[in-house]
Amino acid sequence: MQLFPCPFCGPRDETEFHFGGDAGNARPDGADVPIERWANYLYLRANPKGTAREIWVHMNCGEFFVMERDTVTHKVLSSAALGGEHAA
Amino acid sequence: MTRRYSALSLFKEGLAGQTGWQPAWRSPEPKPSYDAIVIGGGGHGLATAYYLAKNHNIARVAVLERGWIGGGNTGRNTTVVRSNYYYPASVELYGLAHRLYEGLSKDLNYNVMLSQRGMVNLCHSTAEMEIGARTVNAMQINGIDAELFSPDDVRRVAPIYNFSPDARFPVFGGIWQGRAGTARHDAVAWGYARAASRLGVDIIQNCEITDFIIEGGRCRGVQTSRGAIRAERIGMAVAGHSSVLAAKAGFRLPINSYALQACVSEPVKPILDTVVLSPGCGVYVSQSDKGEIVIGGGLDRIPSYAQRGNLPTLEAVIAGLLEMFPIFGQLKLMRQWAGIVDVVPDSSPIIGESPLPGLFLNCGWGTGGFKAIPAGGTLLAQLLASGKHNDISRPFDLDRFASGRLIDEAAGSGIAH
Ligand SMILES: Cc1cc2nc3c(=O)[nH]c(=O)nc-3n(C[C@H](O)[C@H](O)[C@H](O)COP(=O)(O)OP(=O)(O)OC[C@H]3O[C@@H](n4cnc5c(N)ncnc54)[C@H](O)[C@@H]3O)c2cc1C
Ligand SMILES: [Zn+2]
């Protein structure tokens, strides 16, 4: 059983968390977004082997946050509230 | 020297002290160039090489495998073979695979131990029964064998299920496919390897692709741990590692990699002679020819390249198993393991040319690509040979994500993912 650090609640059981995709995958804005851009946003993923920056939601408190972790060792490297840097 | 397997060759080798058997496949040094390269020595890669040689007379082919053939998901899966899908495009694909499986032992001269013991997908409520009836109708209309089972039918094929009145997941009926069953997973890899090698294909193990050779905007070869190898057509069937290689080729895929785990019990006497899947319990189970109870379930919840699986999912699977079969509470688990599978938003595979011309994809089979190996191989071979889609592979091209023509088989494929 792994503990994930929620920036709001502290370390909690991994089963309380839900994966939300790549960090920095900003929703396209505007009226004439090309189809490919929409497809990229909706479907394409970095899916790195190693260090990944990801959006997670802690289902108990409902907060979304950015977690950096290693997808091979599952070691968590950092965890921070979303702030305005969702696109970063 | 005995090359072909038959009753007669077994008998002769018995008299000769088993001294004349040949290695099942050659292990040559890689050549500097080939007509085609297949990356990944799992079932799909090996089948692709075999059909390139057999159907298209292209035998200057190398299969390049980072570890040992069949060491990925092909050797880690729970061996269920079926074609009980919903959409016509899926039925064409998995139906082709199922038919080829039925003739595979003969075609390869290698016993893949296909055992068509039937499979039942249980329904645990009237609502699930309605969906079940809809699925059975769809399968029948698409020409796939299917039957809607009553509770008594389920009792007949799986009498040890928990039919007690206080069962948490009572049986309302089920979806039955009689031609479904299991096949020996290693034998599928080894049989294709042997047959491909005999047609001239070079199977090269311990050869990791580290980069692509890109010239004039086209893929013209690969860099490997055993040097550069060139080819004008390259196919890639590396399952859970597709994104890793795509990144080296300069594009992303609609894929997340997850661990999928399985486990087996100690061997026991025959007690379950069909495959049983319960979506409610999140478990599917069969008994191996050795007598082990083979148990599979849903995906792990966390994207991962750690080929081991995690405990909460395993606990949920075992809890579900004991809801289904309280009698299994006495069993000891012998082994647990996981494979890294490539999960696509619509749970359908990706077959087609990649954004890098000359590089073709066969990936995204997720939790269910073992049953599809003969079709995946046939279709990737045709793409490599002709550069063009077959009608069966066309709907599975990468362009479906931009066009919106998704083939959402998440429900049709049975288990949660
Ligand atoms: C626990 C579990 C249970 C499953 N149960 C079923 C089931 O019952 N029925 C079913 O139909 N499907 C099932 N599946 C899914 C099925 O196993 C896969 O879809 C299928 O085996 C994929 O075959 P493949 O040839 O594409 O991939 P693999 O067999 O994984 O082969 C890919 C190969 O590529 C190699 N590779 C990776 N990177 C590189 C590189 N850089 N260079 C060279 N080689 C590389 C790997 O070493 C590997 O050998 C299950 C999977 C798992 C994990
Ligand atoms: Zn929280």
Image: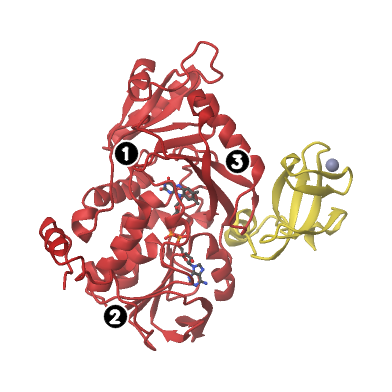
Chain colours: A yellow, B red
Q: Earlier in the sequence, mark 3 or mark 1?
A: 1
- The percent position of residue B205, horizontal first and vertical second, equals 42, 74
Name the disc covering residue B148, or none.
none
Give the alpha-carbon distance from disc 2 to disc 1, as whole Å: 35 Å
Snapshot quadrant of residue B181: top left
Give the alpha-carbon distance from disc 2 to disc 3, as whole Å: 44 Å
Q: Residue furthest bottom?
A: B32
Q: Residue under label 3, please give it.
A: B314
Q: Name the subunit of mark 1.
A: B
Residue at figure coordinates x 16%, y 65% from the top left: B4
Residue at disc 3, CB closer than 8 Å to ligand 1: no
- Judge whether residue B133 can be spotted in this image: no
Snapshot quadrant of residue B236: bottom left
| Three-letter amino acid code of the residue under disc 1 | Ala
Q: Earlier in the sequence, mark 2 or mark 3?
A: 2
Residue at disc 2, CB closer than 8 Å to ligand 1: no
**Badge 1: residue crowd in 10 Å (few <14, some 14–19, many ≥20):** many
Q: Is residue B89 left or right of residue B212?
A: left
| Three-letter amino acid code of the residue under disc 3 | Leu
Give the alpha-carbon distance from disc 3 to disc 1, as whole Å: 25 Å
- Judge whether residue A10 can be spotted in this image: yes
Residue at figure coordinates x 57%, y 45% from the top left: B299
Residue at figure coordinates x 53%, y 57% from the top left: B402
Q: Earlier in the sequence, mark 2 or mark 1?
A: 2
Task: Look at discs 2 and 3 and give the one toward the viewer.
Answer: 3
Q: Does mark 1 fall on the same chain as mark 3?
A: yes
Q: Secondary structure at mark 1?
A: loop
Q: Secondary structure at mark 3?
A: helix
Task: Look at discs 3 and 1 and give the one toward the viewer.
Answer: 3
